[in-house]
Amino acid sequence: MPAFNIYIPPFCMDESRYIIEELIGEFLGLEFEIETWDNPYYLVEHEGKSIELPADFFQRAETDWLSPETLPTRPLSCWDSRSAKMEILLSAPDVPVIFGRPELTISDSGIKISIDIFGSAFFMLSRYEEAVTSVTDQHGRFSSETSIARQEGFLLRPIVNEYLEILWSCIRQLWPDTARRPREFKTIVSADVDVPYHRINKSLPGMLKRLAGHLVVRKKPQLIPGTILNYIAFKFNVLRFDPLYRDLLWIMDVNEGIGNRVTFYFLSNPTDPQYDGCYKLDEPGIRNLVKEVYRRGHILGLHPGYLTFLNRDKMLKDVTNLQRALEREKIPETVTQSRQHYLRWKTPDTAAILEDVGITIDSSLSYSDHAGFRSGTCYDYNFYDVVARRKLSLKERPLIVMEHCVLDKNCMNLQGRDAISCIQELRRLCRMFRGNFTLLWHNSSFNEEIDKKIYQECIS
Ligand SMILES: [Zn+2]
């Protein structure tokens, strides 16, 4: 199949190039050549037929980049895909239109899509809206409640994938011989190693308080001998009596049983005494854990500390520390994957810092208060820096589910079957678009037996 010619309008041309490379080049795997022209719309052209697309967002943003006036006009309109009488892979027939108009017309010579697919997809992938607002939660994070996706009710849909499918259906309609890049659905399981063992192991008053808790609060005196044994064993660098440590090993066991490699993100260098972890990488127990993760074929990633998300020096120190720890254990791996502790992230600063210190895959982009598709996609993609206005080499691997978001009463507050259904539905959508279902489950979140059941259902 020869290359498509894609004509782009004279607005935000670097951003236009980037989003066309991501959607058509990377996601669909099609060959194309870009030419600029003076018309205010895009044209995808081949063998005398063409698809016309609007450039509403980039035209609006050309003179007002990152101003609140460039944000979508709410409420959004919805496109009823049934009107197109085409087969399109969508999670629901009504598609929210972030930019553009809800229309699609087909003629003999081509198709006119009035939904601004390129602008809307750019808006979602680059997290443009996060760079426009300064509203954050107490940890400096952009919350789901501030997002267009949550406000307009499409956070649980991979909207960028759906826009891509609309475009793909139009391409297939005009050029039926076109083949897209094959993709495979993957479940990508991870665990942030925040608390590999109980903090009380390092504090006698803390341990005594916990014993009192067993007696008075939990009324389970049978837990007392185990807590004392764990406390004493810890002094001799033996962690296997610690329930949190055992749950890390259990995560490895159950995932190995079904052929999953788990990514374990380690905190490397405490940056904040209140919010960072209780451990250091040179402790014998943690050294053993790092070796165990590697020996069993899992992936070692970095969990940059609480204060790194806006601080390049601290981020670099974290990378260097973990790299040294791997060298000390003669593990021939380079630190290239990370996820921010507390999911602390500022668009685009954190992405630019990560790229600068040599991280190639980040997996932080999920909301800390709600599961779903923060970037609108379940595909890995190159991040775009909307301040420096350049494509980064950093790949973002969107995080779809963090267990805390689903289970916690301050977040989605789902329990038992409801929690399983929600997670399974998100997984089904990732499978439908042959994307990555990326799941984070902390070892500290197996409080009840049901949690392990939910976990096993979600990874298998
Ligand atoms: Zn963490």
Image: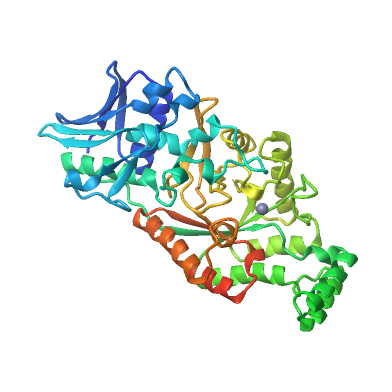
Left or right of 199 in this view: 87: left
Residue in the picture at 58% in, 37% down: 351
Number of residue marks: 0
Q: Which residue is drawn at 21% across and 37% down?
A: 104
Name the residue nearer the viewer: 259 or 164: 164
Residue most extreme to the left: 108
Residue at 56% over, 42% down: 360
Q: Position of residue 293 (x, y in %)?
A: 64, 63
Tell me which corner region of the image, top left, top right, bottom left or bottom right, holds residue 119: top left
User: Which of these two is toward me, 24 or 63?
Assistant: 63
Q: Where is residue 90 in the image (x, y as percent from the top left)?
A: 30, 51
Can residue 417 be seen here? The reply is yes
- 195 left or right, relative to 391: right
Residue farthest to the front, as pictured: 75
From what the image shows, is residue 34 above or below residue 220?
A: above
Name the residue rendered at 74%, 46% in the picture: 321
